[in-house]
Image (cartoon, helix red, strand yellow):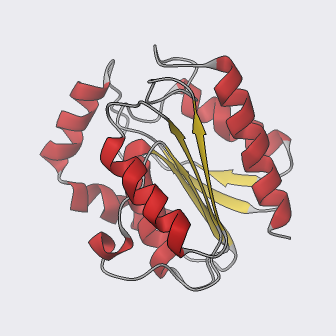
């Protein structure tokens, strides 16, 4: 079973993110879900992104790296904004085992290092997500350049489609995302 560090999206550590972490735990995985906003949550993406911008994206990444601690064999996962610390750690933490990137991805060079050779990554996006156009392009480039990369797209335009507390929630897509995530984790050995 995997040790997963799961980072929340711009709305904060919502009940939906905690429920997703719970689903991973029910499958037998250890899951840490750090709160990068120190208890703050937001009712919509615009307010959450404004808060992240106010903090500074480097601060969000630094908080994530600090909260993750140290340990070999971890899988780093993030929803949207949480992809920043997840991808930073996947690219730089010694002994990282894999990455799960939900609704977001950035070109590896934006985080100052290449994608590690042999490190598996799985990414999930809705095809017409207005918040994720650039991120989906970065994910496509990552999928084309990384040997053990999987990119899944789902029909629709929701951004945080895996969080049941958000208007973008899509139960069918969320269930498939979880199923594929669990298969990815099982394949890591």
Query: Residue drawn at (65%, 82%), measured in percent from left and top?
Result: 118
Q: Position of residue 14 (x, y in %)?
A: 49, 28
- Would residue 89 be found to the left or right of residue 25 on screen? left
- Would residue 188 be found to the left or right of residue 149 on screen? right
Query: Residue drawn at (40%, 31%), measured in percent from left and top?
Result: 129
Q: Nearer the viewer, residue 25 or 99?
A: 99
Residue furthest to the top in view is 167
User: Looking at the image, is 34 positioned above or below residue 168?
Assistant: below
- Would residue 2 be found to the left or right of residue 152 on screen? right
- Would residue 71 be found to the left or right of residue 179 on screen? left
Residue furthest to the left in view is 54
Which image quarter holds the C terminus? bottom right
Q: Position of residue 6 (x, y in %)?
A: 56, 51
Which image quarter holds the N terminus? bottom right
Q: Quadrant of residue 37?
A: top left
User: Looking at the image, is 131 positioned above or below residue 105?
Assistant: above
Q: Position of residue 172 (x, y in %)?
A: 70, 21
Query: Residue drawn at (54%, 64%), measured in percent from left and top?
Result: 143
Give the total number of marks visible in the rendering: 0
Q: Nearer the viewer, residue 136 or 165?
A: 136
Query: Residue drawn at (46%, 35%), measured in percent from left and top?
Result: 13
Q: Can residue 78 be seen in the rendering of this structure?
A: yes
Q: Nearer the viewer, residue 28 or 170?
A: 170
Q: Can residue 69 be seen in the rendering of this structure?
A: no
Residue furthest to the front in view is 144
């Amino acid at each position: 079973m995997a040790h997963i560090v799961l980072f929340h999206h711009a709305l904060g550590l919502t009940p939906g993110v905690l429920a997703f972490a719970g689903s991973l735990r029910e499958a037998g995985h250890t899951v840490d879900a750090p709160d990068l906003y120190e208890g703050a949550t937001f009712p919509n993406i615009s307010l959450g992104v404004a808060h992240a911008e106010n903090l500074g994206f480097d601060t969000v990444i630094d908080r994530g790296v600090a909260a993750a601690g140290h340990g070999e064999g971890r899988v780093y996962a993030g929803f949207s904004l949480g992809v920043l610390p997840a991808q930073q750690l996947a690219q730089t933490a010694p002994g990282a085992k894999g990455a799960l990137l939900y609704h977001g991805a950035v070109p590896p060079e934006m985080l100052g290092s290449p994608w590690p050779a042999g490190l598996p990554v799985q990414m999930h996006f809705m095809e017409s997500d207005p918040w994720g156009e650039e991120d989906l392009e970065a994910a496509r480039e990552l999928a084309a350049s990384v040997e053990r990369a999987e990119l899944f797209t789902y029909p629709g335009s929701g951004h945080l489609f895996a969080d049941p507390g958000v208007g973008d929630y899509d139960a069918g897509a969320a269930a498939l995302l979880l199923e594929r995530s669990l298969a990815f984790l099982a394949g890591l050995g």
